[in-house]
Image (cartoon, rainbow, N blue to C red):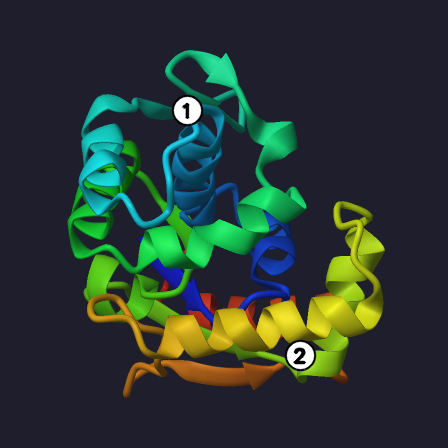
Amino acid sequence: MIVAIDGPAGAGKSTIASKLSQITGFFYLNTGNFYRALTYGIIQEKIKITDKYSIVAASDRYKIEIIRNRIHLNGIDVDDFLHSDAVDSLVAQVSTIVEVRMRINEQIHKVSENLNIIAEGRDMTTVVFPEAEVKVYLDASIEKRAQRRLDQGVSNKDLKDIETSIKERDNIDHNKEFGKLKISADAIYLNSSDLTIDEVCEKVLSEIHKKGSY
């Protein structure tokens, strides 16, 4: 079974997907971390964000794996570096490149073969797993999303700057040439601004039960 969760940055997708994975035993697939790993790699190689050819070449060259629930890039554990300000500032632009998205989607499908999964990202319900049995669009206000990112303790920015970054990220995500963020016609819309983690999970679990799994 595939449970696909889409939504903007900071809506709580990772938190919800992780908890649902623990409850159901389904494999948790954070697809955004594949793009973050690629972005971290090009930063390390000092590849310019305007050099599309080199970024696409890197996506061909890099091997991204999940080992013991942590992201590895070419055999090296990079999980602790995926939410740095440097990665945050570039990942949306990297993910707009159509050739990159196609290559990352191939890797995502390889990882998820023959598994029950909880997958979260920007285009899980519309592009990557349009066949998903349960589709969710998880949203929240910009203020709530910025506060959650600040509370993660991974950014050196203040709350106002984080809000600005999120607005910029939203603009990019909604206007991508391929894989743009949008609400699938058959997805359940949940606004988590005033809901607890448990309340959101209960709503998604109810949909999983309706499909006869778990």
For residue 197, which quarter of the picture?
bottom right
Identify the residue under disc 2.
Answer: 192
Task: Rate crowding at label 2 as few (under 14), some (14 to 19) or many (20 or more) other CA atoms within 10 Å.
Answer: some
Is any part of residue 54 visible from this angle? yes
Q: Considering only vertical position in the picture, is 130 above or below 94?
A: below
The image shows residue 172 at horizontal and vertical percentages of 40, 72
What residue is rendered at 27% in x and 43% in y?
51
Q: Is residue 113 left or right of residue 160?
A: left
Q: Is residue 213 left or right of residue 71?
A: left
The image shows residue 7 at horizontal and vertical percentages of 48, 72
Q: Is residue 159 left or right of residue 30?
A: right
Is any part of residue 11 visible from this angle? no
Disc marking residue 174: none
Identify the residue under disc 1.
Answer: 45
What residue is rendered at 30% in x and 60% in y?
96
Q: Is residue 142 left or right of residue 110?
A: right
In this rendered view, identify the residue nearer to me: 52 or 19. 52
In this rendered view, identify the residue nearer to me: 53 or 76. 53
The amino acid on which the numbered mark 2 sits, given as a three-letter code, is: Ser
The amino acid on which the numbered mark 1 sits, given as a three-letter code, is: Glu
What residue is rendered at 55% in x and 24% in y?
78
Going from the N terminus, do you reach mark 1 or mark 2 first?
A: 1
Q: Residues under labels 1 and 2: Cα distance?
A: 38 Å
The image shows residue 201 at horizontal and vertical percentages of 63, 66
Mark nearest the camera among 1 and 2 is: 1
Dot 1 lies on which element?
Answer: loop
